Amino acid sequence: MAIVGQFANVARLTSGAGCRPAWCARICPDAEATKPALDQFKRGLPPGQSAPLRKSWRARSSVIERFVVVVSKKASPTWSDVRTTLLHFDRAGLLGLVQDLYTASKDNQAFLHARLGLGHDQLQPFKAIISNWICPDVMKGQPVSVSIAKKAISDYKKAIGRPEGMVELSIFYCEEALGFLESCNMEDESYFAALIRMYGRSLELISSLPPAERAKYLERLDKLRSRARNVGWGVEEELNGLWYAAAPGEHQAE
């Protein structure tokens, strides 16, 4: 505990430019004072004998640097710190904080709408993100981002994660991706790989639904298999393989 107390504010001391002498002085008061004498002593030694001294000095500095890094990492706030602070908020303060988060981004708004069950279509904001990034308007120079489109599904899962909602968003992703491939010449292999993985994920999610609710989703995935023959890159073969591997006894029609 004495050591921790001695170095508790090392990170603060290292936050500004040109502060190294200050924190070195606090950690090793004699370090800077003895360095000139050490250098002079090394110059008087025969060749080769100063190496151990340099090694010792560097080792000492390395230990100090590692300690500073550890202290700096521990200084990063965590959820535990946030929770402790929130315990001191009253009702008005918490509402104000949530309002600020709500207005900060559309992603936060979609999250809260889904979590609280607000709006007539809680999936629409997430679908909009998927469509914007997986099937963009290339004529307007809009970019493609598989990661952002997939993040929309992850955000929905964190917000509410209803099984039927997860299935709908996953299939919607596949439909939008195939629509994009049918209209644009895409050469990015990762885009095709992401589509195939999402198709497989959709089949897995459907299997978690009650049997009576599966048919409408399976019908949409079946149509996607047929459309895939127009996009190349072996996508049709991959989707067919996933389709029959998921439930070969149920899927007979081509």
Image (cartoon, rainbow, N blue to C red):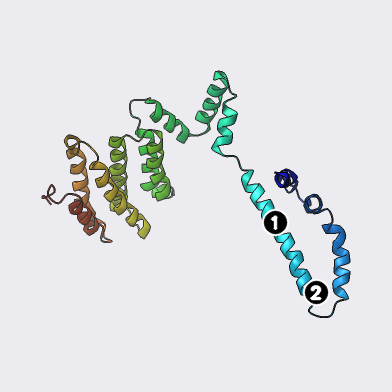
Taking depth in this image into account, of 39 and 21 the one nearest to the observer is 39
Taking depth in this image into account, of 185 and 86 the one nearest to the observer is 86
The residue that appears at 60% across and 29% down in the rendered structure is: 85
Lateral position of residue 245 relative to residue 155, left or right: left
- Residue 35 to residue 163: above or below: below
Q: Amino acid at mark 2?
A: Ser
Do we see residue 178 in this rendering? Answer: yes
Instruction: Determine which quarter of the picture holds residue 91.
Output: top right
Secondary structure category for the residue under label 1: helix
Q: How far from the left and from the top, in percent, is residue 214?
A: 19, 39
Q: How far from the left and from the top, in percent, is residue 163?
A: 29, 36
Do we see residue 229 in this rendering? Answer: no
Q: Amino acid at mark 1?
A: Glu
Q: Dot 2: few (<14), some (14–19), or many (≥20) neighbours within 10 Å?
A: some
Tell me if label 1 and label 2 are in contact, CB under 8 Å: no
Q: How far from the left and from the top, in percent, is residue 59?
A: 72, 64
The extreme bottom residue here reads 47
Q: Dot 1: few (<14), some (14–19), or many (≥20) neighbours within 10 Å?
A: few
Lateral position of residue 101 relative to residue 150, left or right: right
Q: Which mark is residue 50?
A: 2
Q: Which mark is residue 121?
A: none
Instruction: Determine which quarter of the picture holds residue 171.
Output: top left
Q: Earlier in the sequence, mark 1 or mark 2?
A: 2
The residue that appears at 85% across and 72% down in the rendered structure is: 42
Q: Which residue is mark 1?
A: 65
**Foreground: disc 1 or disc 2:** 2
- Residue 160 to residue 242: above or below: above
The residue that appears at 70% across and 60% down in the rendered structure is: 62
Lateral position of residue 241 relative to residue 194, left or right: left
